[in-house]
Amino acid sequence: MLLKLPMLRPGSFALTVLLALLTGLGPLSVDMYLASLPSIGRLLGAPAAQVQLTISFYLVGFACAQVVYGPLSDRHGRRPVLLAALGLFLVASLVCTLAFSIETLIAARFLQAVGASGAIVLARAVVRDMFEGSRIGREMSRMAAITALAPLVAPLLGGVLETAFGWRSNFIALFGFGAAGFVMIWFLLPETLRQRAPEPVSLASTLRSYRRFLENPSFVAHLGIVACCLSGLFAWISASAFVLQDIYGYSAMAFGISFAVASAGYLAGTSVAARFVTPWGSGRVMGIGTAAMALSGLIMALLLAFGPHRAEGLIAAASLYVFGMGMSLPQAQAGALLPFPDRAGAASSLLGFSTQTLSAAVGAIVGHALGRTAWPLVFGILIAGGMSVLLWWFSRGVRSYSHH
């Protein structure tokens, strides 16, 4: 006789952990194997530029696939689409583990990203299905606080696995995380979609939905703030290893620790947001967060122009940026989905695709512009932080109704 397990309830810690695991698959899949990149190149006989494609193709797959999952889940339900996405992630992780050429690894990484992107899009849609009003922002912040552990733990865990077992062990660990999510969804997550989209999924119906979202000023304002948050983050991710190791002379281990220290700001920001979003409201929490991001860029610029040639100030300023992002990002994501309870999946898809694509492009530009100075990184963060606070300020009127 099959054991009947209780389904997860809205607001339960177990539900938050499951949704955080789903949203964490993306950052885990990038940050965990960073320490293994040199040995992958050496053991598969590939130059560094080719090994770098395992990240680039992952980011392309992750951004593009988000377009598909939301409309599919609005029509067919969250559970089956989520299980299919995780199934693809598991198969691709196995292929990564067994890859004996760099070309196979690049292709498998692309497929792994396609699976992981479904997990993050549908986790956001499930939150919109289950919660209302400021509780959406609160649940997003709780999820983000747990997901924030990924960039803290992943590089260190990846370094340990690489040292003890070699680069393939990273993908075995990712398979384990994906399998845990698959089992929890299969046994514990009920179908959360309340009303299925009436029309079949087609390019025309998807574009109609996207047009409806883009005609909504609140959606556009929140999308802009999400894009600013992620653009500054991708500038830091793409440039920090080069800046800290090549310009400031840090070792690989010292870089890993510095990256984890900066990432701790995100955990702090999401924790503060989860605590104060109910009494203060999403709008105020987002305002404080965007102000912190703008201040971070200003501090970096002043340090680089007038400060001593040391990296500690830049790391502290980066930590302030991701602290502000931890406060702003979950609220902006929640605010974008709030007006569309009937099409939360498609809204989550458009939000993810557009902001990921833009921020990945910013990261690529910053990475390409790096020379013997950290200025491209600093300009990226200065512009992203400044734009986010300006967007927050000028969109107060169109955002106000979505936070009552």
Image (cartoon, rainbow, N blue to C red):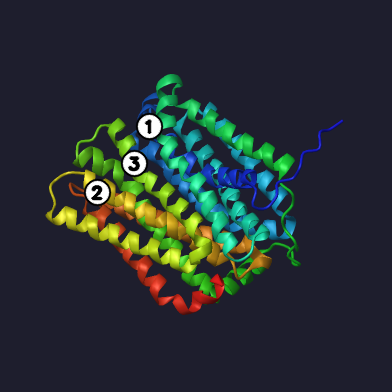
**N-term-proximal mark, 2 vs 1:** 1
Q: Which residue is mark 1?
A: 35
Q: Residue at x 67, y 53 (%)?
A: 10
Q: Residue at x 35, y 30 (%)?
A: 38
In front: label 2 or label 1: 2
Q: Which residue is mark 3?
A: 261
Q: Secondary structure at mark 1?
A: helix
Q: Tell me which corner region of the image, top left, top right, bottom left or bottom right, holds residue 13.
A: top right
Q: Secondary structure at mark 2?
A: helix
In space, the residues marked 2 and 1 are separated at their CA atoms by: 22 Å
Q: Residues within 10 Å of mark 3 (few under 14, many from 20)?
A: some
Q: Residue at x 37, y 52 (%)?
A: 322
Q: Amino acid at mark 2?
A: Leu
Q: Tell me which corner region of the image, top left, top right, bottom left or bottom right, holds residue 231.
A: bottom left
**Percent from the top left, x then y, of residue 85?**
64, 45
Residue placed furthest toward the front: 279
Above or below, 240 relative to 379: above
- Image quadrant where one finds the C terminus: bottom right
| Most foreground residue, 252 or 45 | 252
The answer, for residue 105, to whether it is visible in the render is yes
Q: Amino acid at mark 3?
A: Val
**N-term-proximal mark, 3 vs 2:** 3
The answer, for residue 363, to whether it is visible in the render is no
Q: Are marks 2 and 1 in contact (CB under 8 Å)?
A: no
- Image quadrant where one finds the N terminus: top right
Above or below, 279 relative to 267: below
Q: Which residue is mark 2?
A: 314
